[in-house]
Amino acid sequence: MIGLEQVYWLTGAMFGGIAVRSWRDRSDRKRVGTAAFWALLAVSFGLGSRIGDLANGVIVLALVILGGTRALGRGSPATTSAREREARAAARGNAIFAPALVIPLVAIVGTFTLALPSWHGSPIVDPREVTLLSLALGVLIALAAAIAWLRPPLIAPLDEARRLADSIGWAVILPQMLAALGAVFAASGVGGEVGRIATEWLPVETPFAAVAAYCVGMALFTVVMGNAFAAFPVMTAAIGIPLIVTRFSGNPAVMGSIGMLAGFCGTLATPMAANFNIVPAALLELPDRNGVIRVQIPTAIAMLIGNIALMYVFVYRR
Amino acid sequence: MWPLAGIAVVVVGFAAGINPLIVIVLAAAVTGTAAGISPLHLIELLGRAYNDSRYVSIVWLVLPAIGLLEREGLQERARMLVARARVVTAGRLLVLYLVVRQISAGLGLLSLFGHAQTVRPLIAPMAEGAAEAQHGPLREGTRALVRAYAASADNVGAFFGEDIFVAVGSILLIRAFLHQSGIDVAPLSLSLWAMPTAALAVAVHGLRLWRLDAVLRRLAGGGSR
């Protein structure tokens, strides 16, 4: 059965290729560090499922040392100049959008159809992972179409990937690192402690105060953890269920739904939510790492106030 | 109480501008040690969680395709496309993207768009192109602002749209947690109650994106071309 593992192999192969090209790029003074970083990522994706937790942990530490101590350089892969791009854009017209649109198109069609075909009664493709597998399939089809049409040098896709990967740099592993930190926090009982403190210190004597404390708590705890999913069980067990639902007999569906969305206000405002806030800043080559967060904070505050108001209006209605 | 020291490490580390990778490992070490986890076990814990979350990095597979198209002038073409259409402004374009992103997320098509596959190659250059067509060449700070707003449209649309879809992870989590606490709620009612917030998000962030045009006009020094 084709599942995520095969997509990981593909991703590992890509990073392996980037590592080899980085190693050969003598224009990068730190090419040893650069190549080592991408090579370790290749190992993590290619062999991560087989080498065990300790080896994976050692890889993590090595990646952090390389990424955290400025050991990562930046190569200069061959690409086109700004003027060449202008000329090609004018010559090719809007057809250049077609391969880019193939990716979402295949992703949609795949999401609904990929789980269907089967071989001797068992599905060919893992039905639980159709969304991510469709995305990967869309990328492969788009890439093949673009190569067939544009006839670039064969190494170009890999070198262009290296150009983008170098510009993102160590932030590539940040989302996974934050997930790892979340696991350590969970194993250490951080959530329970925060919930205990929240109930001891927050004044929640009225129905409105309970709603406000729950929503603000969701947002703040999400800012700290980078993830509303980690905040939800803690705040709901500490404030949501005992106070809003049990004591003030609020509607649990309204509480759960709007409570989670109050947490998402925190996601908009924290560097801990790296894949939404820090990685895009790197992808868009913003000078300020927190540039995306800065423009989101006013919306986050307004939405938090709005969520408190909405929950207060709807949760106690009979 | 002491396991919370890791949170303090995170807050201080990020505020002090130390490399986030280092901050994360320090925070994990402090919290884990305070909770009595041995160093070896801590490394295993980090390794397992890192490995289990590889799926968030699958999105990097788009790099070769996007990079190749950029090499052939994709971003430049996106700029040209909007520069010709006078009705398209940076603000209006991003409002449209916010709405499309939210609706598609609400239909469960969360990975249809995203920062790597849509914002960098298409939406950000289009917004820049529209801004340039109206206000002339952009200063570096202004360009960064337009790009940051493009990323924010993607995030706000995705976050406040996704919970309208019944089978999304957060709805399943809410339901599972309430169930294990002895409360049963229908997934559909959870999706239903996500709708007022979704509408509010379009209003709030849509208004801010709409006002981006006025901000750009001011930054460009008053009169438009």
Image: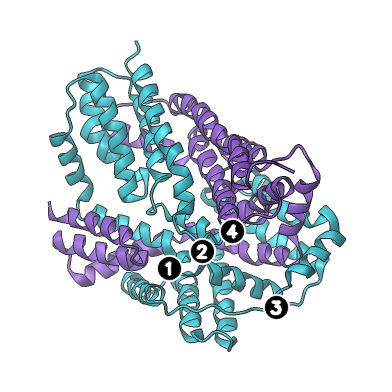
Chain colours: A cyan, B purple
Residue A134 visible at all: no
Number of numbered discs: 4
Residue tagged 2: A5
Which is more N-terminal, label 1 or label 3?
Answer: 1
Q: Residue at x 43, y 44 (%)?
A: A268
Which is more N-terminal, label 2 or label 3?
Answer: 2
Residue tagged 3: A155
The nearer-to-camera label among 4 and 3 is 4
Do discs 2 and 4 share a chain?
no
Residue tagged 1: A49
Mark 2 in CB contact with mark 4 (< 8 angstroms):
no
Do discs 4 and 3 share a chain?
no
User: Gap in Å between the C-alphas at discs 4 and 3?
Assistant: 32 Å
Q: Quadrant of residue B105?
A: top right
User: Gap in Å between the C-alphas at discs 1 and 4?
Assistant: 44 Å
Foreground residue among A151 and B15: B15
The nearer-to-camera label among 2 and 4 is 4
Mark 1 in CB contact with mark 4 (< 8 angstroms):
no
Q: Residue at x 48, y 40 (%)?
A: B159
The nearer-to-camera label among 3 and 2 is 3
Q: Chain of mark 2?
A: A
Residue tagged 4: B140
Foreground residue among B120 and A10: B120
Q: For mark 4, give the secondary structure.
A: helix
Q: Chain of mark 4?
A: B
Q: x, y (%) of residue A79?
A: 70, 74
